[in-house]
Image (cartoon, rainbow, N blue to C red):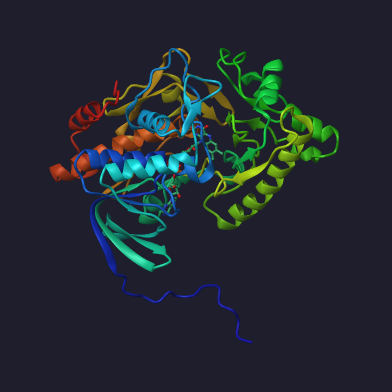
Amino acid sequence: MPESPSHITEPARQIEVIRRTEILVVGSGPGGLAAALAAARTGAEVTLVERFGCFGGNITAVGVEGLAWYRHEATVEANGIGREFEERAKAMGAAVPESQSLSYELDSEGFKLVADRLVEEAGIRPMLHRQFVAPIMEGDRITGIVTESKAGREAILARLVIDATGDADVAHRAGAPTRKTPPEEMQAASVMFHLAGVDKSAFMAAVKADPQTYKDWSTGEWTVETAGKEDDMYSPFLKKPFQKAIEEGLIPAHLSTIAGTWGAVHDTGELTYMNLVHLAGVDGTDPDSLTQGEIEGRKQAMLAVEALRRFMPGCAGVRLRNFGMTIGIRDTRKIDAAYNMTEADVRNEARFDDSIGIYPEFIDGYGVLILPTTGRYMHIPYRAMLPRRVKGLLVAGRAIGGDRIAHAATRNMACCAVAGQGAGVAAALALRSGRDPDAVDIAAVQAELRRQGVRIG
Ligand SMILES: Cc1cc2nc3c(=O)[nH]c(=O)nc-3n(C[C@H](O)[C@H](O)[C@H](O)COP(=O)(O)OP(=O)(O)OC[C@H]3O[C@@H](n4cnc5c(N)ncnc54)[C@H](O)[C@@H]3O)c2cc1C
């Protein structure tokens, strides 16, 4: 028997160019969707490529419905396209009041239609079901991408590319330096699910009889640092039914990580955005790790459902309505940007001359929870979206440059939308002025963002 080779050589082949576009946005989560809309509204011709069958990223593909659960009386925000997501969802019957804040919770299914409508109205060319697999490079400049789909490999050429894949897939493969959190330090991954069959009044009566707070997040498995002011505030948090299930032997003791928040309870009996399963060490850039995470996550979710049936009032008759289409990943690669945001920036109301929008002081992740109840806010600098070494490319969404605690702020969906809108406007104006993104007239970008309703300073 000849020895089996460890590698094969893929033969060179010709790939059809199926589209030429001014601005190509890859990935359609809150970052990419905002980028595509902003670029189109600034007058550019835009193509939006997405590997799944719907736009919306984690909102629609994972079922993350809490867009602005940080909002309180004094919160100061950028508004712009992030706020528009919420307002359009409300107007289209795809949002309900959120239980812990002055915001609306998105309906992850309904938001698919909201995103379709926004894309259509802006005249963006939609390209679903195509996965980015390789950049097309001329020296250090990206000039397009290769996609893989049921149609095989195809090429799309672009004058500028915005990487909004969440994982900085495009930047990484194009040769821009990125930093990936070591898997053992990554924020947990979650298999999300939604339930049907809850008795809303019995459930809400139990929640009101024993209100949980953000301080309760710290009991047991995790310790969460707050600013103190969060400690006594209500949180839609569930832990006691799972503790009981462990005591009764229904959930194995080592799964004390099963706990977390619920999103919305509907009159029709759905209990949605069940954020209860937390899987350590799942690397969202490794398909074997993702495979394990999906299967283990579904097992744990069903243990959680059984525990709710047995130990949570109003849940005796619940059944699984659906899992998210894919496991929820919080933390992978971030670019090493022209400027990497720091913990000090997000904790101390950073101000930048190249601000493309503000974000309230909302820090959620790596054991920190600070809510923007005081009106404090930070600037998001344009340079955090500029990768090194690759020309013609911007990065929006959760992969922008920053350290761990900076990421705990910038990864949030409304902040991804701020970055996306900034990237979209900058790309369109760079193109119009014949400059590279790293030489764009930042004052013109800020003026256009203001015109689009974004608070910059
Ligand atoms: C379980 C969970 C709960 C969370 N809860 C909250 C919350 O309550 N509030 C909040 O604000 N944030 C929350 N987050 C964080 C937030 O959802 C993400 O940080 C945010 O969605 C990132 O936005 P994005 O646009 O960068 O990427 P994503 O939302 O991940 O979108 C990326 C898009 O790119 C597509 N894509 C990826 N790779 C390719 C490729 N190679 N080719 C083509 N398309 C590609 C994906 O399919 C996806 O549509 C949560 C995250 C998770 C996982």
Q: Is residue 199 above or below residue 286?
A: above
Residues 453 and 111: in front is 111
Q: How many marks?
A: 0
Residue 374: name its quadrant.
top left
Residues 201 and 362: in front is 201
Q: Is residue 417 left or right of residue 42?
A: right
Residue 316: name its quadrant.
top right
Q: Is residue 307 left or right of residue 225?
A: right
Instruction: Name the residue located 59 percent from the left edge and 79 percent from the top edge.
Output: 4
Q: Residue furthest left?
A: 433
Instruction: Name the residue located 70 percent from the left edge and 36 percent from the top edge.
Output: 258
Q: Residue furthest front?
A: 268
Q: Residue furthest right?
A: 248
Residue 270 in view (yes/no) = yes
Q: Is residue 289 left or right of residue 172?
A: right
Quadrant holding the N terminus: bottom right
Residues 179 and 407: in front is 407
Give the x, y percent position of residue 289.
60, 53
Give the x, y percent position of residue 270.
61, 35
Quadrant holding the C terminus: top left
Residue 252: name its quadrant.
top right
Residue 337 in view (yes/no) = no
Residues 346 and 246: in front is 246
